[in-house]
Image (spheres, rainbow, N blue to C red):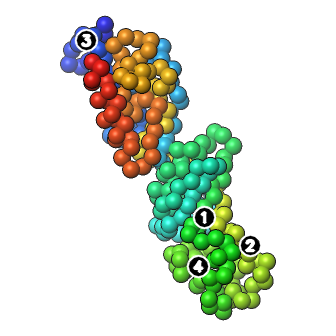
Amino acid sequence: RFEVSTNRGRFRCENLVIATGGLAIPQIGATPFGYRLAEQFGLAIIPPKPALVPLTLPPDTLERLAPLSGVSFDATVSLGQRRFREAVLLTHRGLSGPAILQISSYWQAEDTPAALHIDLLPDTREDAWLHSVKDKKSLLANLLAETLPQRFAKAFAEHLNETRPFNQIPKKQQAAIAHALKHWALSPNGTQGHRKAEVTLGGVDTRELSSRSMASERVPGLYFIGEVVDVTGHLGGFNFQWAWASGHAAGMAI
């Protein structure tokens, strides 16, 4: 059914399995070859985009956060109904860490850039945090440093323009501080691209393939497996598992 021309000659086969991967990490050889081949046979392609990728921040936000590059903290990051509780890492270009990589698969720059909401006190309610403050004569930066990295705590207090002892801050402003800690909003302006992405979002439309065998519904004997297909998993080995499982399905079918 197929003839494949290569630098080692021509090969003919009845079944052809495309396992060429996506666009992530081009420095180790990633190319759009699999997508072009699918289009050659008339299959639909979901436009590929970087996924599980660090996010960049606009210059004004970056100017404020860049000095904190290397600081990480535990937080819950949310976008709409999606939320991930893991580490957040501040970088010289923006945001990274497991929680950011996870949410990046749902953040798209071509849509109206949406703000990420970061909960800096994921184990505590706003009112509970206010009542938990024991040394009310402490500066806000010192109170925050009890649960957050010291450099970040100091910078966040300065961002809130609050240098008074906590007991000198009016109750209304204390509540506003607690709210800011639970709902810190940051609006990325892009990603670090395929070069820094762990996987590719998009690829051969799954509606073109048999979910049992990974075979093309249009072209008998043509199979697509792994990252070239529009299947993207979370962190934790799920993308490896998809590659192995889809490969096994195609292999058993052949």
The C terminus lies in quadrant: top left
Label 1 secondary element:
strand
* Badge number at residue 144: 4
Who's the residue at 24% across and 19% down the image?
7
Foreground residue, 172 or 8? 172
CA–CA distance in space, label 4 to label 3:
65 Å
Residue 179 falls in which quadrant of the image? bottom right
The reply to whether dot 1 and dot 3 touch (C-beta < 8 Å) is no
Foreground residue, 184 or 196? 184
Q: Earlier in the sequence, mark 1 or mark 3?
A: 3
**Residue 230 seen in the current view:** yes
Q: Name the mark nearer the viewer: 4 or 1.
A: 1
Which three-letter amino acid code belongs to the residue tagged 1? Asp
* Badge number at residue 119: 1
Q: Name the mark nearer the viewer: 1 or 3.
A: 1
Residue carrying label 3: 13
Q: Earlier in the sequence, mark 3 or mark 2?
A: 3
Would you place residue 208 above or below residue 77 in this image? above
Residue carrying label 2: 176
CA–CA distance in space, label 3 to label 2:
67 Å
Which three-letter amino acid code belongs to the residue tagged 3? Cys
Foreground residue, 248 or 163? 248
